[in-house]
Image: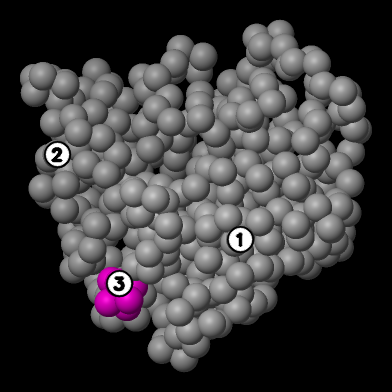
């Protein structure tokens, strides 16, 4: 690959019943609905920059049918003294994945596939999969990978050594299926020859599954993945400044990436050559798991569409029922191995979204409301949709690896320290 993208990316239908969830600890003043405190959010953003956790940040909140907050602090390019701005373009990394999931679920609505179809019915390169245990032993997968598995990270795919050091992770990195010089077909051919980390459906493990989703979109639609997304999602939503292929006129508005140094924790600017290689030079790969670049208003239009149950400004992208399906926990309780998903809070996982299934368990957990769904990106970007509060939120930073403190502090600024959500969803 042109750079260690796999490492950079790192930064089922069963609703868990309230009785199965641990009780939330008592809090002094949980309020029914969130109230946006502009001064509190402004102060939090300023502190993120002053403390050195980010060079620049911005945030946009849409609530009750209108914009209620936009704020920014710091620099999009610290060395050039270019301030963070409303039109700053950032690398979304894994916030690309929900866009890919929406594209695939549009084809599901058209009857192109069923969620429990074997993936190999459409992509035969995944017909004969083997699992490689931690000791290097291989055995045939206990069942086929289902389409549902690639939407909820239960297929058993790896993401390479940036995510783990098991034999299947090492094999993935050596095969380099996400190399920029491969198209999606070549990516699929290479991945189909690699061992799985576990039997499909038995664990949750973040992976290259969204890239397989992109390949499936190409197969089912007959269009290049990038063209399909542009025609059926980005252009209809008015996201005209979002895409994988960027022209050089974007450069003056393009945020620099900053890496947190292990010693001392200070931020070091990523080599600009790596950024240009991925974003502005010719490449064959249009991945489903990363690669989109967008300004904050564009991504808010995507978030608002989801808040609107699949519709924005009279344009329907998905049915309300499909949005509900995607934002409903899909993980059977028997899937207890969930890697680092548990670190994001009291969460399940839907179809390309994390889904909050219970109120925060303790004071350290991110604030949020039961029923919210969200995802984030390796450079510390974050978005969520909170249907209970009629709210969509987009937060931009460009700090790698993903800084969980930024997300915790921002959510506390939005919700307030004691927020648990409406009484009817607190158990």
Task: Mark 1 and mark 2 in contact? Answer it, CB < 8 Å.
Answer: no
Q: Is residue 157 above or below residue 396?
A: above
Question: Which of the labelled discs sits on residue 170, or is there none?
Answer: 2
Which color scheme is applied?
Answer: one colour
Q: CA distance from mark 3 to mark 2?
A: 25 Å
Classify the position of the C terminus by image quarter: top right
Magenta segment boundaries in residue numbering: 271-276
Secondary structure predominantly adopted by residues drawn in magenta? helix
Classify the position of the N terminus by image quarter: bottom left
Query: Badge 1 is on which residue?
Result: 50
Q: Residues within 10 Å of mark 1 (few under 14, many from 20)?
A: some
Q: Which mark sits nearer the N-terminus, 3 or 2?
A: 2
* Residue at position x 49%, y 87% in the image: 252
Q: Secondary structure at mark 2?
A: helix
Would residue 118 be counted in the magenta stretch?
A: no
Q: Secondary structure at mark 1?
A: helix
Query: Badge 3 is on which residue?
Result: 271
* Residue at position x 27%, y 77% in the image: 273
């Amino acid at each position: 690959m042109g750079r260690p993208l796999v490492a950079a990316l790192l930064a089922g239908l069963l609703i868990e019943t309230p009785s199965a969830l641990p009780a939330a600890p008592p809090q002094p003043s949980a309020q029914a609905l969130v109230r946006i405190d502009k001064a509190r959010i402004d102060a939090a953003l300023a502190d993120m920059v002053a403390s050195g956790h980010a060079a620049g940040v911005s945030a946009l909140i849409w609530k009750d049918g209108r914009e209620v907050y936009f704020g920014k602090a710091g620099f999009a390019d610290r060395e050039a003294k270019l301030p963070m701005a409303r039109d700053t373009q950032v690398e979304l990394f894994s916030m690309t994945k929900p866009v890919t999931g929406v594209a695939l679920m549009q084809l599901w609505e058209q009857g192109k596939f069923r969620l429990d179809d074997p993936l190999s019915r459409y992509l035969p390169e995944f017909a004969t999969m083997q699992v490689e245990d931690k000791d290097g032993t291989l055995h045939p997968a206990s069942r086929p990978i289902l389409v549902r598995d690639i939407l909820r990270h239960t297929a058993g795919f790896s993401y390479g050594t940036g995510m783990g050091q098991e034999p299947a992770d090492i094999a993935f990195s050596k095969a380099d299926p996400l190399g920029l010089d491969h198209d999606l077909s070549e990516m699929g051919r290479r991945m189909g020859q690699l061992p799985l980390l576990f039997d499909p459906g038995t664990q949750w493990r973040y992976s290259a599954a969204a890239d397989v989703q992109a390949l499936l979109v190409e197969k089912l639609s007959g269009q290049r993945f990038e063209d399909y997304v542009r025609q059926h999602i980005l252009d209809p939503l008015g996201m005209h400044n979002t895409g994988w292929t960027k022209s050089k006129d974007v450069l003056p508005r393009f945020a620099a990436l900053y890496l947190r140094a292990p010693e001392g924790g200070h931020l070091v600017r990523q080599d600009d050559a790596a950024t240009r290689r991925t974003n502005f030079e010719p490449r064959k790969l249009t991945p489903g798991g990363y690669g989109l670049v967008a300004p904050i208003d564009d991504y808010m239009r995507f978030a608002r569409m989801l808040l609107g149950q699949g519709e924005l400004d009279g344009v329907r992208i998905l049915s309300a029922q499909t949005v509900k399906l995607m934002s409903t926990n899909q993980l059977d309780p028997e899937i207890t191995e969930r890697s680092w998903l548990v670190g994001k809070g009291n969460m399940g996982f839907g179809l390309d979204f994390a889904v909050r299934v219970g109120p925060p368990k303790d004071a350290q957990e991110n604030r949020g409301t039961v029923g919210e769904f969200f995802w984030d990106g390796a450079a510390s970007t974050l978005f969520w949709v909170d249907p209970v509060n009629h709210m969509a939120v987009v937060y931009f930073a460009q700090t790698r690896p993903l800084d969980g403190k930024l997300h915790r502090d921002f959510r506390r600024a939005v919700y307030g320290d004691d927020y648990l959500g409406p009484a009817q969803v607190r158990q």
